[in-house]
Image (cartoon, rainbow, N blue to C red):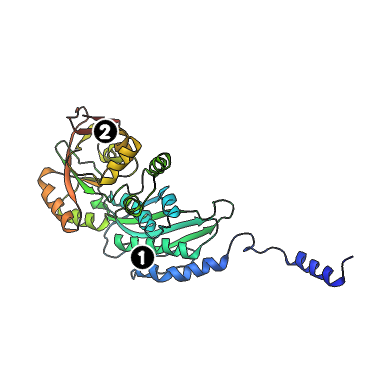
Amino acid sequence: MLQLGQVLELFGWFMSGLTYREAGVDIDAGNELVRRISPAARRTQGDGFLSALGGFSSLAEVPASYRNPVLVAGTDGVGTKLKLAIEHDRHDEVGQDLVAMCVNDVLVYGAQPFLFLDYYATSKLDVDVAERVIVGIARGCEIAGCALAGGETAEMPGFYRPGDYDLAGFCVGIVERDRIVTGEEIAVGDTLIGVGSTGPHSNGYSLIRRIVEDQGIGLNDALLDQLLAPTRIYAKPVAGALHSAPVKGMAHVTGGGIVENVPRMLPKGLAADVNLDSWERPAVFGWLQQAGRIEEAELLRTFNCGIGFVLCVAPGFEREVMDSLARAGETAVSIGRIVSGETRPEAGHLVATGEGYALG
């Protein structure tokens, strides 16, 4: 028979009930994370921001220097590249990947990134890991010249596996209405300028991970450095190029590679004729092609193959744009030209339209 003290103890246990922390969500950990990342976020914000990190939402004034501003919005994630980062404790640079994937998309219209928000979701918040990721996001915002205006951290026990997390990003850029880059004026004979990538950026990682798993490949630090090199942020170099000469169209080379992304800026009836020998591919793409026995067409449809961003200019402005990009530290090369949609590729060339592509 239970003694009176035991009865009271059991009664107290039943009466106390569960806490949110016992259910898997630690509010105190979330508050600690906000405290840690606030200095990094504040460094990215200019005078036009009217709210502090931690509010329900963020307020900002459109800079007075714009005469007729148009807002350009984009969103993206990092994808399964995160799996490699998590498995190998490489959390410090995936934040730059997140910023880059959003900022570079906004950039194709000539917009300069203005503010950025992030969403970080995990099963159980590890404040140390989350801090490394979000400080990396802030560093990416500094590179891009935009403000980390806020974000959201979600603990979702039972939804993600222990140790896993996911990221989403949201970017708003601003461009003067009369300076929007639309691609409408692109014509036969225009030049395509490719800007170098740091590696696969944030695309094709389901295939990369499959190659690693199927081949039983051990990833040493040197190979991980190549596979996890952060996505390049082109905002400031491209801003300089836009001021140096008229740019008719731009493309961010993401999933689908040059094959699918360059035609997105082209008027109907035109094609991109790309000389595949005009630039040197980073070694990681040769390694992937060999290790996975990937055919050339599949490689070009999956990866950027060394070209992360493309600008289209009239032939007379090619030198000015390439020199501007070079001064900003970018590797820029002339990779091809605009042709009619019926053009057949020469040997070593790719001709791509919105309807398809052909290899010479």
Please say if the residues under marks 1 and 2 sit with CB atoms less than 8 Å apart.
no
Q: CA distance from mark 1 to mark 2?
A: 40 Å
Q: Is residue 137 above or below residue 195?
A: below
Residue that carries the numbered disc 1 in the rendered image: 61
15 sits left or right of 47 in the view: right
Q: How many marks?
A: 2
Q: Which mark is residue 353?
A: 2
State the residue at coordinates (44%, 50%): 83
Q: Amino acid at mark 1?
A: Glu
Q: Quadrant of residue 51?
A: bottom left
Q: Quadrant of residue 65?
A: bottom left
Q: Secondary structure at mark 1?
A: loop
Q: Given this view, does label 1 or label 2 mark the residue nearer the observer?
A: 2
- Residue 3, can we see it? yes
Coordinates of residue 245 in the picture (x, y in percent): 15, 52
Q: Is residue 245 above or below residue 115?
A: above
Among the two numbered marks 1 and 2 on one chain, the one whose residue lies closer to the N terminus: 1
82 sits left or right of 141 in the view: right
Q: Amino acid at mark 2?
A: Thr
- Residue 303, can we see it? no
Viewer-side residue, 63 vs 259: 259
Q: Which mark is residue 193?
A: none
Viewer-side residue, 253 vs 178: 253
Q: Around disc 1, counting alpha carbons within 10 Å, would you say few (fewer than 14), some (14 to 19), or many (20 or more)?
A: few
State the residue at coordinates (34%, 60%): 140
Q: Is residue 260 above or below residue 151?
A: above
Coordinates of residue 259 in the picture (x, y in percent): 28, 37
Coordinates of residue 8 in the picture (x, y in percent): 82, 70
Q: Quadrant of residue 328?
A: bottom left
